[in-house]
Image: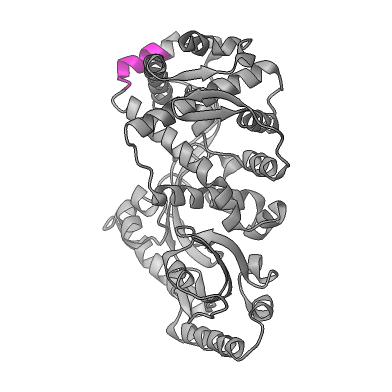
Amino acid sequence: MSYKSPVSAGIAAVSISILFSSFSLAQKPQVVDQVMAVVGNNIILRSDIEKQYNQALTQGVAGSEDLKCEVFDQLLLQKLMINQAAIDSLIITDAQVDGELDKRMRYYIKQIGSEEKLEEYFHTTIVQLKAELRDVIKEQITVQQMQGKITKDITATPNDVREYFNSIDPDSIPYIDAEMEVAQLVRNPPVSAEEKKAVRARLEEYRQAIIAGSDFSVYAALYSDDNSTAKKGGELGFFERGMMVPEFEAIAFNLKPGEVSNIVETKFGFHILQLIERRGEQINVRHILLQPKISDEDLRNSVAFLDSIRSKIVLGTLKFEEAAEKFSDDEETRYNGGLMINPETGTTHLSPDKMDRLLFFQVDTMPLNSISQPLLMTSPEGKAAYRLVIVKSKSKPHVANMKDDYQKIQEVALAEKQSKAMSDWIARKSKNTYIQINDVMNGCAALKHWLKDSN
């Protein structure tokens, strides 16, 4: 069961195939462009239509002139909302954009296998890739927030849900795939003070050798634990403020060309940096990263800690949700009762075929609401960690029904009401907004409502 709102093409999470096509198109020589529409203070270019059109083709949609018209229709809707957002002084912060960029990058890296593979595919760095996507992400967030503002008071009552479900032709009731809800409590083994001291000492040796005249890039290639940049002499490429972790940026943006920094600690490990070049608000640096190694004792301590937490949960003296919030090292799930989020849908329902394979094999046969023993995992930073997991719900493939799938049916019923509210809003705003459409698009049946309003 699925639903697409009038602006879903503009706000849906970008798949890896869309990322590939978007970036690849940006690399190609640009042809002579043409303004196809003006919506308030925003324009739509022919290249915008072609880009979205080609993205649809990469997802297996059959190409046609009608598809181009539908793409153009979606772009008009997006620009109308972006224009209204400016009128309403809707503010999208850098932190919002950075957070979404980081989340997307983690998803893309997981899909393709590693940061190094992603950079090899595009022949660029993660930093430059994020810079290419930044404006796109900001527009998507703007559209999302405007849509949320328009539909925030829309609800679907139990009566609305029943009416919606009863209106579906029995032969058209959708088939629901198997799904799970899995919660986790993650523990990253703390690195010993001795190991941190040893790593700092080794990095300081490299730093002193470089200051004495040794080549920074050679040391980076030989010793850096950042595999994605080591082969490039540690070079990160140009980036601006807000694109790196704060501790790293605090040092990087205060360096002079050629200067080597003191040691800086981040969640990734210990770094030394050298500024290569500054261009306005952007800088290019190289770095050497050394990551402290986690000892067997550190791992055993984490397992022992999780065992103690598990015992309290089993005895009933501590709830899993409370334990996750208090003790989990995973920021994405700790305040959500530990529930893992499906990055494709934004819900807590995980499709087994889309789950991490190791996790699926670990939880597939677990009874509902039973807590696992501490399970080995790899953190987003590539480090060994342990976690407790609990399967909160599990369903088999079945035809949708009100008893088992009320929440999903309610979501679709709500989406239908939100779609109606969006359509009404668009009809009102399009009459009061300057909209001019290039005459070459007059043949598009999908644009009749726009063409009528723009005369």
Report the magenta stretch's main SS. Answer: helix
Q: Is residue 59 left or right of residue 371?
A: right
Can you give x and y, in whole percent of width and height, for residue 246 in the image?
42, 65
Query: Which residue lies at the image location 69% right of the left edge and 43% below the top edge?
Result: 24
Q: Is residue 300 visible?
A: no
In the rendered view, tell whether residue 390 sits above or below residue 450. Answer: below
Query: Which residue lies at the image location 49% right of the left edge and 75% below the top edge?
Result: 255
In the rendered view, tell whether residue 313 sits above or below residue 336. Answer: below
Count of numbered labels shown in the rendering: 0
Q: How is the image coloured?
A: one colour
Q: Is residue 176 left or right of residue 247?
A: right
In the rendered view, tell whether residue 446 sits above or below residue 411. Answer: above
Q: Quadrant of residue 330?
A: bottom left
Can you give x and y, in whole percent of width and height, for residue 25 in the image?
69, 40
Observer-nearest of 15 and 428: 428
Q: In this view, which residue lies farthest toward the left?
A: 317
Query: Which residue lies at the image location 31% right of the left edge and 15% below the top edge?
Result: 159
Q: Which portion, as a residue range, is magenta?
A: 155-164
Query: Which residue lies at the image location 52% right of the left edge and 16% below the top edge?
Result: 173
Can you give x and y, in whole percent of width and height, for residue 326 in the image?
31, 60
In the rendered view, tell whether residue 308 sits above or below residue 352. Answer: below
Observer-nearest of 262 and 36: 36
Q: Is residue 383 visible?
A: yes
Observer-nearest of 206 and 394: 206
Can you give x and y, in whole percent of width and height, for residue 113 in the image?
65, 54
Q: Is residue 326 left or right of residue 67?
A: left
Specify whether residue 395 is painted magenta.
no
Specify whether residue 157 is painted magenta.
yes
